Image (cartoon, rainbow, N blue to C red):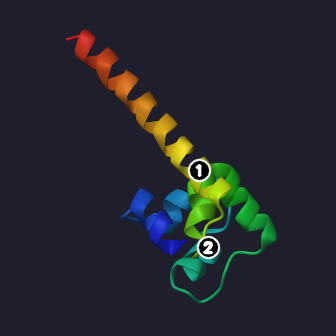
Amino acid sequence: MARFLRSIYPQKTAMHVAADTGLPVESIKNWLNGVSAPGFRATVTLALTYGPEFLASMVKEKPRWLDRAAREHRQQELERKLESIKAELASL
């Protein structure tokens, strides 16, 4: 989980995650440092914010449905970025 969150926000991870989720910065710092783990509500909040890729980062052996959902979510994100880049290129 910490690796996943740090991959999104390499700098000031806890601050950015708190801004995205509304969760307390100190709790997030504890999770990132391995002092504690998020509880059920925080995990649900993180999963709703970051999608199936977040859930996949929390388990060693992913069920096929979760692996598929994480890949599909990532593909959709990349397709949105691609469309944005194409629009920017067209405006040049």
Residue 30 occupies which quadrant of the picture? bottom right
Residue depicted at 52% across the width and 48% down the height: 71
The correct choice, above or below, for 78 with respect to 45 in the image is: above
Residue 79 horizontal/vertical position (percent): 43, 30
Distance (Cα) linking label 2 and label 1 = 14 Å
In the picture as drawn, the residue positioned furthest to the front comes out as 64
Spot occupied by residue 43 in the image (x, y as percentages of width and height): 71, 66
Of the numbered discs in the image, which one, if any, rests on residue 10?
A: none
Q: Position of residue 27 (x, y in %)?
A: 64, 76
Using the rendered image of the protein, determine whether residue 18 is visible from the camera's viewpoint. Answer: no
The reply to whether residue 26 is in sight is: yes
Residue at left offset 58%, top offset 56%: 67
Residue 28 occupies quadrant = bottom right
Task: Name the quarter where the N terminus is drawn.
Answer: bottom right
Residue type marked 2: Val
**Furthest residue in direction right, as rendered:** 41
Q: Earlier in the sequence, mark 2 or mark 1?
A: 2
- Which of these two is toward me, 63 or 5? 63
* CB-based contact (under 8 Å), mark 2 and mark 1: no
Crowding near the residue tagged with mark 1, few <14, some 14–19, many ≥20 C-alpha atoms within 10 Å: some
Helix, strand or loop under label 1: helix
Q: Is residue 60 above or below residue 65?
A: below
Q: Nearer the viewer, mark 2 or mark 1?
A: 1
- Taking the image as shown, residue 92 lies to the left or right of residue 51, namely left
Residue for point 39% across, 22% down? 83
Residue type indicated by callout 1: Arg
Residue at which label 2 appears: 59
Relative vertical location of residue 80 with respect to residue 90 in this rendering, above or below: below
Please identify the residue farthest to the left as the structure is shown.
92
The residue that mark 1 highlights is 68
Residue 92 lies, with reference to residue 77, above or below; the image says: above
User: Helix, strand, or loop for circle 2?
Assistant: loop
